[in-house]
Amino acid sequence: MHIQALRGTTDLLAPDVARLARVERAARRLAKCYGYQELRTPILEDAQLFLRAVGETSDIVQKEMFRFKDRGEQDIVLRPEGTASVVRAYLEHNLHKTEGFARLLYLGPMFRAERPQAGRLRQFHQYGVEAIGSHSPWVDAEAIVLCVEILRACGVKELAVWLSSMGCRPDQERSRAALRERLRPRLSTLCKECQGRFEKNVFRVLDCKHPACQEMARTSASSPFLLCGDCQTHFGTVREGLTAAGVMFDDTKVFARGLDYYTRTVFEVRAKGLGAQDAVAAGGRYDHLVEELGGPSLGAFGFAAGMERVLMAAGDAAAEAPAPARQGVYLAVLGAALMPQAFRLAQQVRARGMLAVMDPEGKSLKAQLREADKWQCRFVAILGEKEQQAQALSVKDLEQGTQQAIAFDAFPEAMAQHAVHTQS
């Protein structure tokens, strides 16, 4: 019996890796324009990090974390999200002392033990940014604009930005009480899960997918979040920034982010092609998390996007990258006795930073030419008995349709000069 990949995981073959790499390049390129620097955090983290940061009533902690004891009986998790890990790294490496305000980009795999479905795997990939060290609403607006720009660069054309404010901690206490008061008369008609959320985390009812819960949670035409004057001003500035940047948004939708650390601005980007759960990116402000993890009182804002869902939302547009220019050389070897010479030449080309591929199996010249085309090589260098006697390769330029003889000793540098010319 063949052993297969675990349920909810998938192998990424070359075309899949290429599509993910395009998303990563877009995220890196645009984040750099906004001053973000990349960091990488471990896949394994102390479970207490997420219990403290994400909240014990969140779905991530209650149902979705891969959690286990290591050999030393330490409580370990596979990281389910990026924000807590980034804040932990920010504090552990004293960036709050050396940099203060830091803009950080992360990319990599995350893990959640949720029911696998299209675009939602147990091991999935995210990119995200965290701007740590500022309470300014302009940081919120700037990050949301960046989020939209990355999605558009990845080919997500039809998207909608949902924008809201959950208010500060005192606002949230008043909002919880008001929402419970509105839901209490019909508590018995909520789904069983939301009946449990009623006392533990009533805001989670706003994101329930059960139709009856959605109807009751959203009967009011106004936001369920009651904002103080300062939070209203903050939210108004965020809207002003987005308007100035030309980003359309909808601030009438009722929703809540499910993690305990969110305060004030929250947003989701919805995209077509993802079904009922159509959020492709989301985030918000978290002004207490740094302090709750042992650091100073610092404001922060961030967002994350699942790369697999970005590719689903982009659809065919994700594959609309321009065809790569042919590059590199394929050494077509006609005879096993010539392999040592071909191997030396290939290594000399590679040492100069250029792609060099050769056939180790002794295929026919016709088959090797097909291989060269598959690799999208610019050149095919043929090495047969005639070339060996002349100490010169027959080099075909598959892009220009020309052919010339190049001496063995001049060949590596000729290929390297071509690489420099095409990259300049």
Image (cartoon, helix red, strand yellow):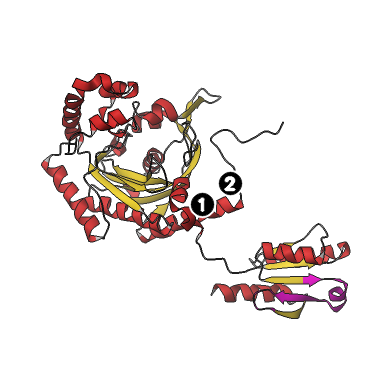
Query: Is residue 142 in sight in this rendering?
Result: yes
As shown in the figure, which amino acid type bears the numbered disc 1? Leu
Q: Is residue 395 magenta?
A: yes
User: Seen from this angle, which residue lies furthest top?
Assistant: 188
Say whether marks 2 and 1 touch (CB < 8 Å).
Answer: yes
| Residue 160 location (% of width, % of height) | 31, 50
Q: In the rendered view, does 383 fall on the left or right side of 141?
A: right
Reply above or below: 346 against 315: below
Residue shown at the point (43%, 57%) measured from the top left:
155
The residue to which callout 1 is attached is: 20
Q: Is residue 396 magenta?
A: yes
Q: How far apart in space, not on screen, are marks 2 and 1 (Cα)?
A: 9 Å
Using the image as rendered, state which of residue 14 and residue 66 is in the foreground. Answer: 14
| Residue 58 location (% of width, % of height) | 35, 29
**Residues rendered magenta in the picture:** 382-401
Q: In the rendered view, does 381 fall on the left or right side of 191?
A: right
The residue to which callout 2 is attached is: 12
As shown in the figure, which amino acid type bears the numbered disc 2? Leu
| Residue 406 location (% of width, % of height) | 75, 79
